Amino acid sequence: MDFFSLHMATRGLPTERRFLDYICDEESAVHKGAARIKTHYAPDGSGLLVVLSATGKEGTNTDEVRRQVIEDLARGISRFIVEAKEVELAGGEASKRYRFSSREEEEAVAGFCAKMLSGEEEGDRAAQRYRMNEIRTALASYLEEARYLDIDGFIEFRLKAYKDKLREMVDLAMEEYLLDQQYEEFIHLLQYFVHFQEPLTPLVHLIHKDDQEFGMYNEQFAKITPPSVGGVIAQMADQEMEMEDMVVSALISLSPQRIHIHTSRPEAQIIATITRIFGERVQLCLQCAHCISLSKESRPKNQETSGS
């Protein structure tokens, strides 16, 4: 007895195998031998056809097997959509909603979208689980009444709330891309400005204390009072001044020939920004007395206690 027939548009053998792995996992009726699966390609070449049916083993309750298969399909297909197809679906929505100037721009937006959809943060994973559960519920309800499922058609016409959520993610990804482009243009403008600026100060020591907190000192390690910020960068960027902007603006006003950054966190974004703007003028210092002091200050208190 055939339970269900599934149709999935052809996307290559690896994707088809992955799809079958999702619907025939270790918890499935197929894996346990209570149901069998047959696959073949549609005569018109439109895609893969999958038929699930009872094995007909003596003593098997067909209704129970059918319920198990519904659960298997709802679980497996929802995972397949979110984990294997989602980024592709979002890319399709992006192409419909925006006219990209180049393939590179389209791929950049797709990258932001993939990061949002498949992020490793707990909030990202929770959002994934929520989308998966919503799709799983919709699939189980549909399969209770139907014996044929076109997966692409189901996504297009039965998952309206899910598609709306994807469109929201695409719009957010586009906003992130545009902000990133503005940031890159701003960095290039500052690099150009610094390149033609005459040095006014021989050396500035930047003591990177905590996240975006800095102390600024001259070559004798006397504290420098940064000049009034807001002039250079405020004229270049129509936005509120943040700490990163304030540090960069102060450095541009001082126009140092060399910048020594003392830090215990060389990977911090603000360090990368300063290095990009001032280029060869920047030297990172990680091992002098000031750096060692910073390293001790940044160690967690419990680590200090355990080490004493």
Image (spheres, rainbow, N blue to C red):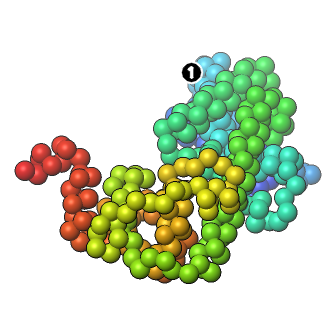
Along the horizontal axis of the image, is 43 left or right of 303? right
- Residue 38 appears in which quarter of the rendering? top right
Residue 130 x/y as whole percent: 60, 29
- Residue 260 appears in which quarter of the rendering? bottom left
269, 206: nearer the viewer: 206
Along the horizontal axis of the image, is 196 left or right of 121? right
- Name the residue: 73% across, 54% down: 178
Image height check: is 193 above or below 9?
Answer: below
**Amino acid at the residue labelled 1:** Gly
Residue 1 x/y as whole percent: 73, 28
Is residue 279 visible in the rendered structure shown here? yes
130, 258: nearer the viewer: 258
Residue 177 x/y as whole percent: 70, 54
Is residue 147 visible in the rendered structure shown here? no
- Name the residue: 42% across, 74% down: 259
Image height check: is 224 above or below 148?
Answer: below
Residue 45 x/y as whole percent: 88, 54
Mark 1: few, some, or many residues within 10 Å (few <14, many ≥20)? few
Identify residue for label 1: 59
- Name the residue: 59% across, 78% down: 197
212, 204: nearer the viewer: 204
- Name the residue: 37% across, 63% down: 224
SS at circle 1: loop
